[in-house]
Image (cartoon, rainbow, N blue to C red):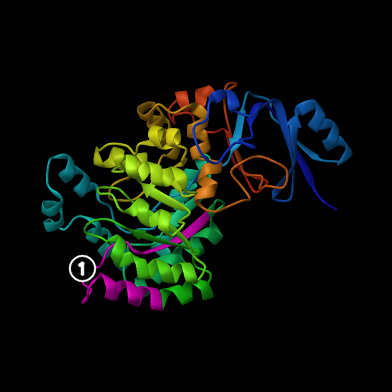
Amino acid sequence: MKKYTLIGPFKQILTMAGLPLKGALSDEQLPIVENGGIIMVDEKIHAIGTYPQIQAEANGLNAENIHIKTNMVCLPGLIDAHTHICFGGSRAKDYAHRNSGKTYLEIAKAGGGIWNTVTETRKATTSSLIEGVKTRADRHLAHGVTTIEVKSGYGLSVQEELKMLRAIALANEQCQSDLIPTCLAAHMVPKDYKGGPDDYLLEISTSIFPILKKEQLAKRIDAFVEEGAFSPASIAAYFDKAKAMGFDITVHADQFSTGGSGVAVKYKAVSADHLEASSKKEIQLLAKSNVVATALPGASMGLGCNYAPARRLLDAGAALAIASDWNPGSAPMGNLLLQAAVLGAFEKLTNIEVLAGITYRAAAALNLQDRGTLKTGLLADFTAFPTNDYQEILYQQGMMPPSLVCKKGKLVVTI
Ligand SMILES: [Zn+2]
């Protein structure tokens, strides 16, 4: 016999259902169920509606009742569509050096920069990588983030990239949140590689792609398309191969110079992430495509530079997701809600645009159809904040932690 659970009443349920994937949104469009309840069965949502109506349905199903006695506003579980939370070491020294005015080159000479993280990650054991991922994922879960994308990209050799992806897979088994792995072996050409970018990419794709399939380590291939990393021309054969093998493509695009967003559109990528350097041309290109434009405000905060043009992307008609980019170098904070709220203030985004960026539009960036909104048949992933008005959530700029987080029908955080 199926076991049903009723949870509620919530002051408001923001289902985020029935909204367009692309373009600007006004707060009047926000689908709110006032005084609502949710019936869950197994891992999924069975029904959602006003509390009296849903309570009557629950009685007929002999549902267990989780009665909420305080004010709460319920949202879909938050989705962080871009992180690098699998790593060894710390870059606190880099952060201080950068803020004191040292150049990229000076920091690299002092043993810092991304190569420091690569060295520390290579030195790390699989179990210490797993522990690091779990600790960060659990912190995210306490903040209401129930799905987290996690990239490799600090191994930069066949063996070390696989070590990272296997660690992410094992961490996923031990975490309550879902970790969505992405292979970012094309983060940069490793310093110790004897050959050019084309040789490196050929070796990586030939050796790693089949193993990703065989061991089901990742369905997504990412690359850093940037001056000093991989050019649009050098990444073409790599993405051709990935596409032919059925991987989803995602691109680190337009962070410091443009070019990456064009690659993302050409390869029908699921997302183009960063976009701080995107100009009108790139904005138009993305808006005409189905590529989700993912802003990473945490990287702008960490580096002290401008934000992605989120307002202009939405006004042009693009789909905008917002992710944390949590990584040891440029985005050490890892607080998705705080960063999304601050991006909203700087870029003049409506509350609904910000919330869409960390729920259903983030789900689209990960090509996940089973989450991101609250409706019958989707995963019972939701998070509830201790307030009677949804506007308080972003107004508190990330400082109001959820009082309840539900992952696949299980309460995983309760305060
Ligand atoms: Zn990144």
10 Å neighbourhood of mark 1: few (<14), some, or many (≥20)?
A: few
Q: Residue at x 37, y 57 (%)?
A: 263
What's the amino acid at mark 1? Lys
Magenta-colored span: 179-206
Mark 1 beta carbon near ligand 1 (under 8 Å): no
Q: Residue at left 85%, top 31%?
A: 56
Report which residue position mark 1 lands on: 191
- In the rendered image, the vertical position of residue 335 relative to residue 342, given as above or below: below
- Residue 155 relative to residue 13: left or right: left
Residue 409 on image: x %, y %: 68, 46
Q: Is residue 198 shown in magenta?
A: yes
Which quarter of the figure is the C terminus placed in? Answer: top right
Percent coordinates x, y for residue 347 in the rendering = 37, 30
Q: Is residue 54 visible?
A: yes
Front residue of 413/391: it is 391
Q: Is residue 69 above or below residue 296?
A: above
Please state the horizontal and vertical placement of residue 233, each as a whole percent of the image: 29, 64
> How many numbered discs?
1
